[in-house]
Amino acid sequence: MQEYNFIHSCIRVMDLEKSLDFYKGAFNLKESKRKDFPEDKFTLVYLTDAEENFELELTYNYDQEEPYTIGNGYSHIAVSVDDLETSHKEHIEAGYNVGELRSLSDSSSGYYFITDPDGYRVEVIGK
């Protein structure tokens, strides 16, 4: 079987600058590339972490007037962090929409959820 490498995941956003501020501020992501398509009325912005193995693609459609319907099939994006408790505290102090710290019954790593400006949830998991 072929080997596959995941390269990016895409979400659609209503306010590109607000979303960029969120993902850069909350997760220290950096913009790796931007592609504007004015004739087609959309912009793609790719964000990546320090390892640059995977990107989050933010799609901004110029004419979108209503918030996107996330639906009941989407669940979340996940990231890991070395110090979960400190991360949780920093996200709360920054004023983000942050859930409580939790852990599964099998005593695996703890986690919490943070919600972006468009309602997408990001799970933050302790390493």
Image (cartoon, helix red, strand yellow):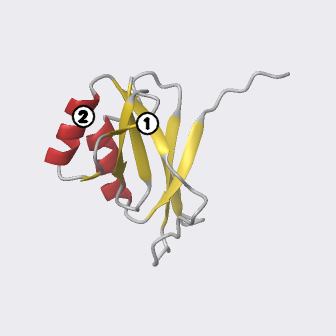
- Left or right relative to 99: residue 11: right
Mark 1 vs mark 2: which is more N-terminal?
2
Residue 104, label in figure: 1
Residue at 45% x, 21% y is 51
Locate the N terminus by quadrant.
top right
Circle 2 is placed at which residue position? Answer: 87
Query: What x and y, as percent, mark residue 77?
Result: 49, 44
Foreground: disc 1 or disc 2: 1
Q: Nearer the viewer, residue 107 or 44?
A: 107
As measured in the structure, the alpha-carbon distance from the residue carrying label 1 to the one carrying label 2 is 19 Å
- Badge 1 density bin: few <14, some 14–19, many ≥20, Cα 10 Å: few
Q: What residue type is disc 2 on?
A: Ser
Query: What x and y, as percent, mark residue 60?
Result: 48, 60
Task: Note whether residue 47 is visible.
Answer: no
Residue 13, label in figure: none
Task: Note whether residue 44 is visible.
Answer: yes
The answer to whether residue 3 is above or below residue 14 is above
Residue at 37% x, 37% y is 111
